[in-house]
């Protein structure tokens, strides 16, 4: 995949699975990875089918990656920055039990009331 026109922005360096990638400041992680010709950036949880960014607007969740150690990040919704470390996400990532979203869900289940 190539860019339509030259851009006048700073170059930032990110790493994807240890591979150095040059991106433009302001690029989303997904755009930066797609611009290298990469098509797959994660594997599905059940069948390990390769997936890549599809909607590029935060809807399909086919772009989930690990960024700087945090899983389940939508590559299409996050801008690159110099030194960012991105890893392919394989399968379903665990959600930390002390995360605010996990606690909110747990609270909701407890209050749904089958007592
Ligand atoms: S490409 Fe669809 S949510 Fe990121």
Image (cartoon, rainbow, N blue to C red):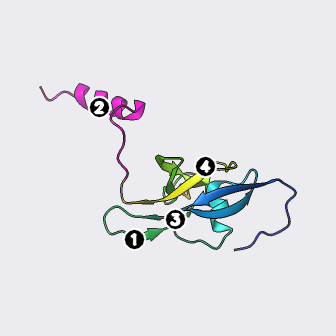
Q: Which label number is shown at residue 41?
A: 3
Dividing the picture into quadrants, the one containing residue 38 is bottom right
Label 3 residue SS:
loop
**Residue name at image x 64 percent, y 74 percent:** 37
Q: Gap between marks 2 and 3, in whole Å?
A: 30 Å
Going from N to C along the chain, the mark reached first, 3 or 4, is: 3
For the residue with label 4, is its CB less than 8 Å from the closest atom of ligand 1?
Answer: yes
Going from N to C along the chain, the mark reached first, 2 or 3, is: 3
Q: Residues within 10 Å of mark 2 (few under 14, many from 20)?
A: few
Q: Gap between marks 1 and 4, in whole Å?
A: 22 Å
Going from N to C along the chain, the mark reached first, 1 or 2, is: 1
Going from N to C along the chain, the mark reached first, 3 or 1, is: 3
Q: Gap between marks 3 and 1, in whole Å?
A: 11 Å
Is-magenta flag for residue 103? Answer: yes
Identify the magenta region: 93-114
Q: Gap between marks 4 and 2, in whole Å?
A: 26 Å
Q: Residues within 10 Å of mark 4 (few under 14, many from 20)?
A: some
Label 1 residue SS:
loop
Q: Which residue is mark 2?
A: 106
Residue 84, position as x, y percentages in the image: 62, 50
Q: Which residue is mark 1?
A: 49
**Residue name at image x 61 percent, y 49 percent:** 77
Mark 2 in CB contact with mark 3 (< 8 angstroms): no
The residue positioned farthest toward the left in the image shown: 115
Q: Gap between marks 3 and 4, in whole Å?
A: 15 Å
Going from N to C along the chain, the mark reached first, 4 or 2, is: 4
Q: Which residue is mark 4?
A: 77
Q: Is residue 6 above or below residue 78?
A: below
Is-magenta flag for residue 85? Answer: no
């Amino acid at each position: 995949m190539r860019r339509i026109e030259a851009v006048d922005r700073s170059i930032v360096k990110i790493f994807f699975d240890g591979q150095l990638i040059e991106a433009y400041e302001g690029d989303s992680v997904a755009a930066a990875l797609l611009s290298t010709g990469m098509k797959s950036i994660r594997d599905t949880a059940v069948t390990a089918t390769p997936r890549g960014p599809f909607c590029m607007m935060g809807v399909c969740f086919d772009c989930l990656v690990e960024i700087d150690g945090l899983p389940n990040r939508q590559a299409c919704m996050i801008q690159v920055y110099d030194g960012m470390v991105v890893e392919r996400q394989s399968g379903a990532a665990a959600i930390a039990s002390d995360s605010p979203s996990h606690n909110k869900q747990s609270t909701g289940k407890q209050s749904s009331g089958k007592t």
